[in-house]
Image: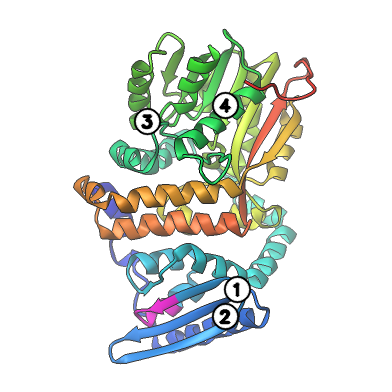
Amino acid sequence: MSDQHSSTIAGEEFLAGSHHRRFKRLARRVFFTIVTNTSRSSLGTLQLTEKWGAHEKTYSFGSGELQADLTINDPNAYAALVFGGSRGLGRSYVNGLWDTSDIATLIRFLFRATQPLRTFLDRLANRFTALSNLWHRRGPSKVKDRENIHAHYDLSNEFFELMLDDTMAYSCAIFQDGNTSLFDAQTEKFDRLCRKLRLTPGDHVLEIGTGWGGFAIHAAKHYGARVTTTTISENQRLSALERVAEAGVSDLVTVIGEHYADLTGTYDALVSVEMIEAVDWRKYNEFFATCSTLLKENGRMAMQAITISEQSFERAKHQEDFIRDLIFPGGCLPSVTAIMRSISNVTDLKATGLEDIGIHYAKTLQLWRDAVNSQFDEVKALGFDERFLRLWNMYLCYCEGAFIERHISVVQMVFEKPRAEAYLSYPAH
């Protein structure tokens, strides 16, 4: 494991810890109560095995098509699962306190099991939104934004090359059917965004969030568009420059390293693919106002965004969950309503398109996970260890389960300036 990443998940603070005996007993009782209540509603089946030292016992809860299993390797796991939320769930798995044959299915079961509690907490958060916003009124700085992006996207270009397909798209693909390759599905995603932007040769597109250059290369190569693309990940910027040159579109694509708030000029179109998740909720107005200013009077904006359910947004935006804790520091999933609120408050943009593609992310994540696990020797050669593999499997499977259970989703949204030409439908390419 790289020194940078091991420092994130090593040390005593990462471990579930040795809890007081009475808390262990309490946590176990609470956990059994939760899964017992779930079993009564036929939301799924859980086979629970306790296996530590000389102790070994198996329990079965519930009924239904969804069948999950959980092996507790250390009684401290109960306290981590019950009192630690998703952070405890992720940390305790990485440390080997529990195992399962299928993380995604177990996550789905746990989402169902904790639905009543999450609904209560969501309602509580929505009731006290104004107070919470006042208490958390200060957002991160540009320097902090760069630090957060560096922590994840600068992990290792070589690692991401092992996980992703040749487009190097680290975002939800769109599959035509079960036989569609990941490369073709990612290409379809890029193509759909280009069609929604109605790109034509010579259009100047601004992309906020370069990734490794996949969209910029596609828009230039297949639509003849000029693309200025920006990323605050230096590793991504350098890699994107190389990929643009290899694709032979250096004359059309300019890769820069500017923060979105520092961008200037006006463009025919603007695109942002799963970058809004790195924008703090307190910065939404700034982000969308900037996007609107950067568009010509007849310009269009297309955005692909991972979104959280409307009911959970107010709670989640303040929560230090597993993903924010160990994967994407500073991350924040918007809701569609939160996006539209900023659009209406600070821009003259009109929403003209909304497409939900969330179910495609489960398949995308499965293919990424398969790629990582099938090439673990190559991953280890990059300096990552088995604990990192457990962390990455938990991350990918946690997200997969959340997408399948519709706790989170992905949307493509289109916004147009007042003078944008109206069309009856999106053109085929």
Looking at the image, is mark 1 or mark 3 earlier in the sequence? 1
Q: Is residue 191 visible?
A: yes
Q: Residue 88, position in %: x, y?
A: 44, 68
Q: CA distance from mark 2 to mark 3?
A: 43 Å
Read off the residue under disc 1: 113
What's under tag 1, amino acid-wise? Ala
Which portion, as a residue range, is magenta?
70-78
- Which residue is at a point 42% across and 20% down the rendered structure image? 256
Which of the two discs, 1 and 3, sits closer to the camera?
1
Read off the residue under disc 2: 35
Looking at the image, is mark 1 or mark 4 earlier in the sequence? 1
What's under tag 4, amino acid-wise? Asp
Q: Are marks 2 and 1 in contact (CB under 8 Å)?
A: yes
Looking at the image, is mark 4 or mark 3 earlier in the sequence? 4
Query: Horizontally, is 226 left or right of 146 in the view?
Result: right
Read off the residue under disc 4: 191
From what the image shows, is residue 370 above or below residue 275? below
Displayed quadrant of residue 269: top right
- Which residue is at a point 50% across and 69% down the rendered structure image? 106
